[in-house]
Image (cartoon, rainbow, N blue to C red):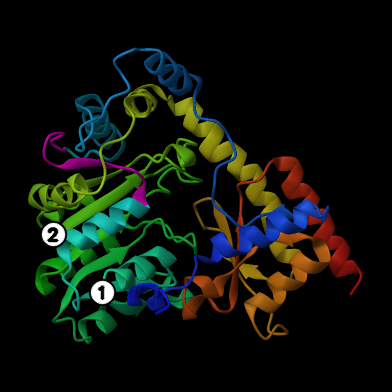
Amino acid sequence: MPIKPAARLSEVSEYYFSRKLKEIARRNAEGQDIISLAVGSPDMPPSEQTIEQLCATAHETDAHGYQPTAGTPELRQAMAHFYKKTYGVELDPDTEILPLIGSKEGILHTTLALVNPGESVLVPDPGYPTYTSLSKLLGAKVVTYDLEEENGWQPDFARLDAMDLSDVRIMWTNYPHMPTGAAARLDTYERLVDFARRKNIVVVNDNPYSFILNRKPLSILQIPSAKDCCLEFNSMSKSFNMPGWRVGLVAGNAEMISWTLKVKSNIDSGTFRGIQLAAAKALETNTREWHEEYNINVYSRRRAVAERIMTALGCTFDKRQTGMFLWGRIPDKYATCEELTERVLNEARVFITPGFIFGKNGERYIRISLCAKDAKIKEALERIEALVRGE
């Protein structure tokens, strides 16, 4: 009999960017010189002291063994101090923080810890596709809740209260929001905590974009009693220019952290000590000036160019967006967002993201990443303006 894949694979497709980037790589190998403004992978380096710490630890003869699944004490303490100085949130580094090998891993582990097969999770639409795909792979049912431009891409709590949520275990939230750039709001966090307590649901807020084009970072854990019913993910990928290092964290309710650790301890064997100590160094020593330059100044320059690209394409957008993307509504003349993105790819050789990959509420939108060198994003603008002039 032919070998067949597990039935769970029928629930998901290959990640859009995994599939599309193979196409882009092939076309670049053919000499097409495609500029990618699609993926949110920071193109700048970590701080110098971060790299120096990594190198120094790598030279230590006793630094290469297995590390604690719960993370080194140095990293947990640095993460707790970071939350205190950034958000004013007190966390016990021994019980209320768990370092992760990136947030994707955390989505997997948290879902395994909290959701039984056949139970449901609430996922935002539009939202990060991995919330949906990993839930399906784990046998959970996905229930979407709408985020709409008219409501500032914030949850509609009246609509949520009217839904049957009897078997929902987790509600995924993500503020500052990706892909729309909607800012975090304390009033939204307050209502989410109240909602979680009333519905006996765990709210997991994914919070990697706190610093990008944003000088007032917020955390759901700032809300009194949030630790009773909430967890929060954070990441060093975006704000510390460390996407390939795979360092994140989950913080909040100590008992739920212990359940997540139980899952994690059966899946991985810890992160290389050099990466953990370098991450701790970044958390402890990156200055306000460093963050101002990399998270505000650089992205502000690029954002100004991205806004010109959106305008050239006839898209409308909210100038109050934060984060490392620009989200815009496409003109009515296009039947779908992919019609526009494929035209730009094929005729201007610029790859931008169609909003449909984030859910049905993203079908009339596109997303531009700011993670490209200034010269490249300016060249992308020139190509697109030339395309529009030739219409």
As drawn, 21 above or below 79: below
Q: How many numbered badges does the structure rendering display?
A: 2
Q: Is residue 85 left or right of residue 124?
A: left
**Secondary structure character of the magenta stretch overall:** loop
Q: Which residue carries the number 2 mark? A: 229
Residue found at the very far front of the displayed protein = 1
Q: Along the line of sight, which residue is nearer the eye, 176 or 319?
A: 176
Q: Is residue 25 left or right of residue 96?
A: right
Inspect the image, locate mark 2, and give the three-letter code of the amino acid beneath it: Cys
**Residue 330 position by quadrant:** bottom right
Residue found at the very far right of the displayed protein = 390
As drawn, 369 above or below 46: below
Q: Along the line of sight, which residue is nearer the eye, 262 or 51?
A: 262
Where residue 98 is drawn, which disc sits there? none
- Image quarter (top left, top right, bottom left or bottom right) of the N terminus: bottom left
Q: Residue at x 61, y 57 (%)?
A: 38
Q: Position of residue 292 (x, y in %)?
A: 51, 33
Magenta residues (range): 91-103
Q: Is residue 80 magenta?
A: no
Q: Which residue carries the number 1 mark? A: 139
Q: Earlier in the sequence, mark 1 or mark 2?
A: 1
Is any atom of residue 245 visible in this view?
yes
**Residue 37 position by quadrant:** bottom right
Q: Which of label 1 and label 2 is nearer to you?
A: 1
Q: Is residue 92 magenta?
A: yes
